[in-house]
Amino acid sequence: MKPWKQIITDSQERDYSLVVPRDIEIPLDSGKIISLIGVRRSGKTNILYSLMHRLRQTIPTDAIVYINLEDDRLFPLTPHDLGGFLDSYFELFPHNRDRRVYFFFDEIQNAPEWERFIRRLHDTENCSIFVTGSSAKLLSREIATSLRGRTISFEVFPLSFSEYLRFREIKPGHSSRAVSMMKNAFAEYCRTGGFPETVGVDDLRAKQILHEYLQMIMYRDVADRHGVGNLFLLKSLIKHCFSNIANPLSLSKLYNDFRSQGIQLSRNTLFDYISYLEDAFALFLVPVNSQSQREVMRNPRKLYAVDHGLKGVVELPTGADIGRIYENIVFLQLRRKEQTICYGRQKQEIDFVLPESASPRLINVAYDISDPATRNRELNGLVEGVRGLGVHEALLLTAEEEETVATEAGKISIMPLWKWLAGV
């Protein structure tokens, strides 16, 4: 017999008011099952806590229940045990059968046949349901299949820079003090990344935390889930990918490089391992912007990581890395809001083309444009893109420079990246 009543009342006695809110907007009464998916340790549980705190402003505490399905008091779970949860809840609060209640299930994949239970709960009870799970167990396509149109999925990423400032209790502003604090925080954000657990810790501890995360992704979310047989190849692939963020990924070249190192593999195996890392939300591949599917397939995709801090786990950082770290940060900021992101390849490459976005739809990223050749290359690429797409403005993100450049094709805004991210 599972101690459901104890677990339910324990959850209702907890204080959720100290949770730092995130920028993600999640409806409380959508009529759908809300599922939060994303890479491990990106903050899904704290988002549930924040939602519960919001509800407590207007809803009785006994109508809100949080269940962590990694609670050791629940092991081992059987499909029958979940039915015991519902019975226990209504035995404790029978008056709530006549009102809407809110159920939060964390790490739902730990419950066998959870899909049937959640479906039944949604179809037969007057309730709002929120679930989270590690991305390897609760992918959006799997949810869509299991819950058959009953769910709305939200992707959860590590902290954006504006969220990072909130976690550090730094208020964006224009004063000299505010600017210096934001720039200092941004330098730290570039080094340690955006996972919530790394906020405010020293660089060595942050690297240890990120190393643990990478190990979890590699073993639990990829190797165990997909039955990976060649762990040496998987480790080599992970090191290559996180070392080469913001670079094109040519699978043919990578295949030949691995073969030249004496690693035994097939092209299909390499393709599969890349797709496993994408499924785990560890990596993202961005295609070239083209109306021709043949052109899209012919060109390599550009590689980005779910958190730029992971780059420092697989290699020693150098000063030359900062430009690619900047570009990865911009990708993540765009990915939080845009589903369709491409890069442009004409005479010169454009880092980001957003075909379905409002303006600006063209963005380049360059850490330092003090050299005239670099500045001209970045601006000329955007001018070419502005003409080709028929838009009227573009954006160039840098470390320090800020100005507006008027060209015959349109306006190009130059901004410091930290300022663009902070929204000041």
Image (cartoon, grey):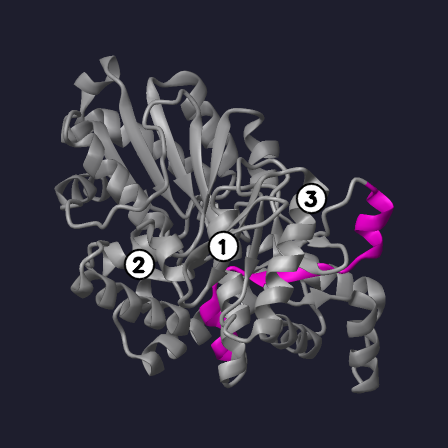
418 lies above or below 20: below
Give how far apart the Cα atoms at labels 3 and 1 are.
Answer: 26 Å
Disc 3 on helix, strand or loop?
helix
**Stretch of the chain drawn in magenta:** 292-313
Q: Amino acid at mark 3?
A: Arg
Tell me residue 406's x, y (percent): 53, 49
- Check the image and report above or below for 173 versus 201: above
Secondary structure of residue under mark 2:
helix
Q: What kind of element bears circle 1?
A: helix
Answer whether residue 72 is visible to the viewer in this image: no
Q: Amino acid at mark 2?
A: Tyr
Mark 2 = which residue? 164
Label 1 neighbour load within 10 Å: few <14, some 14-19, many 20+: many
Going by the image, does 284 lie left or right of 414? right
Q: Quadrant of the N terminus?
A: top left
Q: Nearer the viewer, residue 71 or 401?
A: 401
Numbered badge on residue 332:
1
Q: Nearer the viewer, residue 212 or 182?
A: 182
Which numbered tag is attached to residue 387? 3
Q: Residue furthest top?
A: 98
Q: x and y percent of residue 174 in the render?
A: 22, 55
Amino acid type, residue under disc 1 in the picture: Leu
Task: State whether residue 38 appears in this view.
Answer: yes
Q: Is residue 25 left or right of residue 319?
A: left
Task: Using residue 214 as the reference point, say whether residue 47 is left or right of it.
Answer: left
Asked if marks 3 and 1 touch (Cβ < 8 Å), the reply is: no
Name the residue nearer the viewer: 116 or 243: 243
